[in-house]
Image (cartoon, coloured by chain):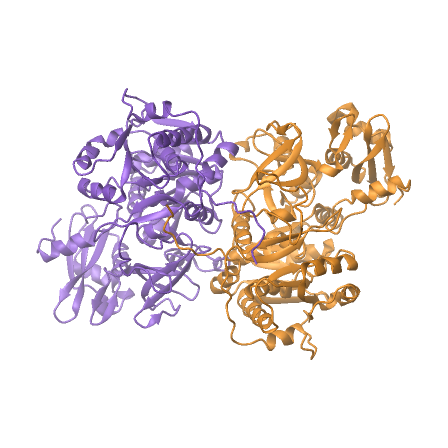
Chain colours: A orange, B purple
Amino acid sequence: MFGQMMRSPLLMTSFIDRSADLFSKVEIVSRLADRSIHRYTYGACRDRAYRLAAALQKSGIRPGDRVGTLMWNHYAHLEAYFGIPLAGAVLHTLNLRLHPQEIARIASHAGDRIVIVDNALLPLWEQIAEHFRPERVIVADISGNRSVSENDYETLLENAPKEFNPVRADEDDAVGLCYTSGTTGFPKGILYSHRSVALHSLSMSLPDVLGLRQADVILPVVPMFHVNCWGLPFTAAMLGAKLVLPGPCLDPASILDLFRSEHVTFSAGVPTVWMGILRQLENCADASALLKGMRMLVGGSAVSETLIRGFEAYGARLIQGWGLTETSPLATIGGLKSYMDDWPHDEQVATACKQGLPVPFIEIRTVNTEGICPKDGQTMGEVHIRGPWVASGYFEWESDGGCWTQDGWFRTGDVGTIDSEGYLRITDRTKDLIKSGGEWISSVELENALMSHPLVQEAAVIAIPDEKWQERPLAVVVLKENANATPDMLRSHVAPRFPKWWLPEKFAFVREIPRTSTGKFLKTKLRELYRNGELKI
Amino acid sequence: MFGQMMRSPLLMTSFIDRSADLFSKVEIVSRLADRSIHRYTYGACRDRAYRLAAALQKSGIRPGDRVGTLMWNHYAHLEAYFGIPLAGAVLHTLNLRLHPQEIARIASHAGDRIVIVDNALLPLWEQIAEHFRPERVIVADISGNRSVSENDYETLLENAPKEFNPVRADEDDAVGLCYTSGTTGFPKGILYSHRSVALHSLSMSLPDVLGLRQADVILPVVPMFHVNCWGLPFTAAMLGAKLVLPGPCLDPASILDLFRSEHVTFSAGVPTVWMGILRQLENCADASALLKGMRMLVGGSAVSETLIRGFEAYGARLIQGWGLTETSPLATIGGLKSYMDDWPHDEQVATACKQGLPVPFIEIRTVNTEGICPKDGQTMGEVHIRGPWVASGYFEWESDGGCWTQDGWFRTGDVGTIDSEGYLRITDRTKDLIKSGGEWISSVELENALMSHPLVQEAAVIAIPDEKWQERPLAVVVLKENANATPDMLRSHVAPRFPKWWLPEKFAFVREIPRTSTGKFLKTKLRELYRNGELKI
């Protein structure tokens, strides 16, 4: 028997209406490429998003069509976040950090009919356009300059029909498309729906998750072309929270400057961002930029204890989250349970270093060759996940690549443990695990241990072939400026934490570790360099 | 084009699994009829809820069947909250404050196949049973005593089959049934679904709504037979928050005792409850019972400024919510926007007295004979509402009674204004409005003004027939103990706030004001008494 409740669909487009109706005065602040600041309100944002939607309809965009964006984090991109779905179309954010040819392949695979491009990114676009030609390119000069071209973003909005025909949307309709950053193989597209975005926004705002509220001032350092900016623009609009968008100025000094001038209470980014900001804080001692009680969501890679404690000293709290493009992304969240308040501080920090508990409506399990792993905090297995904002397939992809189990879970490719309290700890990517003598060694744990040495700036551990053991770990280390350390020093630093057979025999000291477009260690590159005998970077 | 996200249904039954999996040690504390305290954990609660579900299946309960409960707030009722839906059946909470014959009519209309009855409520049940006989009555002696009868709750759980066959649930399946308290006419049933309960739980937990978290200790004074206890048991389980259930001991001293001993951080009830508790606090000066920062949700009727300021003095915050049985119930929530922090304290309190802003996914509008009212904070109209946890019809009811508009909104029967900031203020029930000379007078606003007089304990205002004006207000007033006040004194106290024609000519001083089973003024009774010329109570 069905309940008798209204069939009101969960539509993410309702968020921009809510913020404009109830919080029309709340600001959206953007830093432009020339470093000037643009300010307007949710009221103005809604008007322009609707005009964009009307203009897209007039351009012949039909429900389900893909519209690409090649933009930094700023107000025009936010308008696209809502205007494209309002037209019933699918927002496809292109990752500008990829190779132009790769971007072209992705846009072509997605079938983007129109692409909206930042003025500042036109040189990149020209390289892309050699390989991919959409029906139309709209150029947004966010400084407000306009050209006479009908493909100028401002002109487009100005000429938009006054009457907008709302699309009759279903909550399962597609609204967004993001491609995985793809350290190996061709990137695959994840097709989000109104429903998945709406539920993800609700869940991520909960007090036990990120505790987001209208009074927050949210600055996402994470790019808007990366997993919907972790959902933050949608959530901010749902709540009517002030948004601060840093544009292309992502250096630590510029970010800290916005933290200070806009009274930012919440930010989000990958660990590299926070390492840079912490160094900047330590060097310039300008601690006033951080509001006491400020929270930072960190995701994308594991967070070191050093980083957590570093920000703690400034009264700011790093919150660890875990997820993937396939999971919208937020799946687990770090933090303590009520009864852990009495725990010793060191244990609390150790718990905060874990990837945390699954948020409401998300289920996780770890699975190895022997089946579902016990929740003992020891047994490593691949993390499986399911829930209403987890992908069920890849966009226009013939096979599921073995990524979904028969019983309906997504296989994340991450390896981890779950402890008796339910906390997930990611120990590695399946492909980065080191298989030594039939046992697994976690590269991530070795890296974290190495990075806790005071002379080490960064460390990556990869598997190298070994005749006797099949694979052995190689530590690739970047030392701090002017620092000197020997393999023996580092080995004895980490030795107390691991079984002896985990310790790397070989060390390579390099100047930098190659990274992916989203800031993760590019271990495929390290392995390739090692194979070619050239591990000098 | 559909998104490619998992079709994971939103099931409220997943909440008890989540709390038992992740927060199995968190306690559920119940006060029993003999005043002793029962404690167990979410882990134990889940086991027993599953056993109840298995026992109900074995008893022949099939998906969609209704199972009634006639119980106070305690752990066995919580087991029914989850165990009945786990069996695929519908939890129908019977309001023990109604007349036995009325309860029988409701249970019969609902078609309850089984009813679970508190041992302590057997005398009431016997009166009900004269008019309604379900297939089976299960008696729960929550003190843990058990009889040998197979209809004893403990015996039932003990004999439950070890194997439980999970029901394949759809998120639109019915899980709960509550009847309106019905001040007029036969009560009507609202049939909640998994989805409506799940979304209501997410929304009510948001930081800008109630800000509920795992670390909260939640004591619902609102009965579990009243609109699902405002959803709090479901939400507490979703979050893994400690629950404190007061059983039948609802006097202010007993509640304050639990606040103190269990470190309660969040409570909920109607204004009468909070008036009693405030009086108790003022008389006994035992302020330590309230944790600093404690929040109380108040709903059911409008909250007076006096009450808000009264608790403020103890460092506790009353949060005003508005909703109806038809809206699950939470629809709007009081509170300030970020930019109101600088407002003068008086304006802040005035804003906190309003019923507040619609929570995410809920839409409201006010409508009068001229159409949709402007958002000017002045124009009164009937409040219409829509959203995913709003009823679309009444259970087994041939006509919709004109309660839904053609364009899909529920007509609440409440009258109010919406101001330019989007805040709803309820001014009356449509049927309680006083129509004087073609204009409306709000009985609620007169009542609040009268109750702000230091000598007045309570005041209700009703319409009485008038030859010239059609209707005029009559003020029915309860003075504080040993207080003396004349109509003139009270009239001049309220005069500055209203147009002259709003002021009541007639006053009736009484010893108490009759109330409905849920603590609201029973104005039908007052009108009836007045018609019979007997307004001495």
**Res A444 → quadrant:** top right
Q: Report whether residue B413 is seen.
A: yes
**Quadrant where the N terminus of chain B is found in the figure:** bottom right
- The extreme left residue here reads B533
Tell me what residue is drawn at x 48 percent, y 40 percent.
Answer: B239
Q: Give left or right: position of B321 versus A135.
A: left
Tell me what residue is drawn at x 45 percent, y 48 percent.
Answer: B199
In this picture, is A109 found above or below B15? Answer: below
Q: Give left or right: position of A363 versus B269.
A: right
Residue A311: x, y in percent?
Answer: 67, 43
- The extreme right residue here reads A533
**Of the pair A258 and A507, the residue shown nearer to us:** A507
**Of the pair B136 and A10, the residue shown nearer to us:** B136
Tell me what residue is drawn at x 67 percent, y 77 percent.
Answer: A150
- The extreme bottom residue here reads A148
Residue B335: x, y in percent?
Answer: 43, 54
Q: Give left or right: position of B251 versus A54.
A: left
